[in-house]
Amino acid sequence: MASMRQLEDIMAQTWASIKELSESHKETERVLKENAAEAKLRSIEADKRSAEADKRIAKLERTVDGLTRKMGGLNNSIGEIVEMIIIPGVKENMNALGHNFNIASPRKEFSGADGASLTEVDLLLENCEAVMAVEVKTRFAVKWVERHLKRLELLRKNERITGMRGKTMYAAVAGIHIDTDARELAVENGMYIIEIEEDSERVSVVTPDNPRTW
């Protein structure tokens, strides 16, 4: 039979265990509350960024409507109007950076040796020594940067057909809103970033630290 001393030790150990479990439970609750608060903050920030992007797109849509009316009510899509704003500004800005492109071809299509469609470039800038393939989207996401990278490799792989043999090939992405992840991926791959300034209906160009060539 257990002695009084042994019973006291057992009780002490039991209370110590209960206290430890209680403190552990409180710590777990604290961590859960902190994580919930952080998740809520991240959600609020994400909603805010999305709302800001939606505002920019809505603002450009109003610009598009204005341009469409000025053009006599032509049935242009947002993509077509974006290209109309981008094309003149891109060539001017790139030449100011020393590229000296003398040809700007929107929606440049390339066909394979069998005549089937190979790929299409939204805007191709050219001179005798270099080209720049520009991908245009209203809102640029990571998937569009990845597809543009594949397009660039395809153009180089088929340089005999595309007429790019011996030419240096640069790349750029252009849009009204470029997602943060898409921007980072484009910068990592040495692409120029072209953003539309809705208020002035002009474009601004961000030059990568190390422009990549293909």
Image (cartoon, helix red, strand yellow):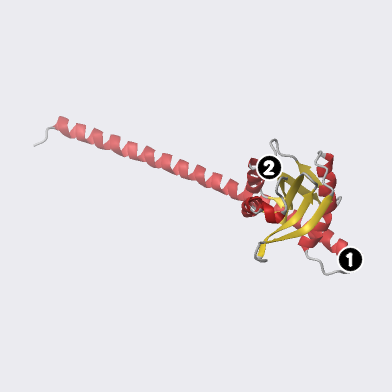
Q: Position of residue 90 (x, y in %)?
A: 81, 48
User: Which residue is nearer to you in this view: 23 or 99?
Assistant: 99
- The answer to whether residue 60 shows anywhere in this view is no
Q: Position of residue 214 (x, y in %)?
A: 66, 45
Q: Amino acid at mark 1?
A: Arg
Residue 69 has which mark?
1
Q: Position of residue 51 (x, y in %)?
A: 69, 54
Give the residue furthest to the left: 1
Give the image location of residue 196, x and y in percent: 79, 50
Give the mark toward the camera: 1 or 2: 2
Q: Are marks 1 and 2 in contact (CB under 8 Å)?
A: no
Tell me: 114 left or right of 58: left
- Of the pair 148 and 6, the residue shown nearer to us: 148
Q: Which label is found at residue 213?
A: 2
C-alpha span from label 1 to label 2 = 40 Å
Mark 1 or mark 2, earlier in chain: 1
Residue pushed farthest top?
5
Q: Relative to 131, is 13 on the left or the right?
A: left
Residue in front for this viewpoint, 200 or 206: 206
The amino acid pointed to by label 2 is: Thr
The residue carrying pointer 2 sits among few (fewer than 14), some (14 to 19) or many (20 or more) residues within 10 Å by Cα, namely some
Judge left or right: residue 26 versus residue 8.
Answer: right
Dot 1: what SS? helix
- Above or below for 45 versus 77: above
The answer to whether residue 185 is seen in the rendering is yes
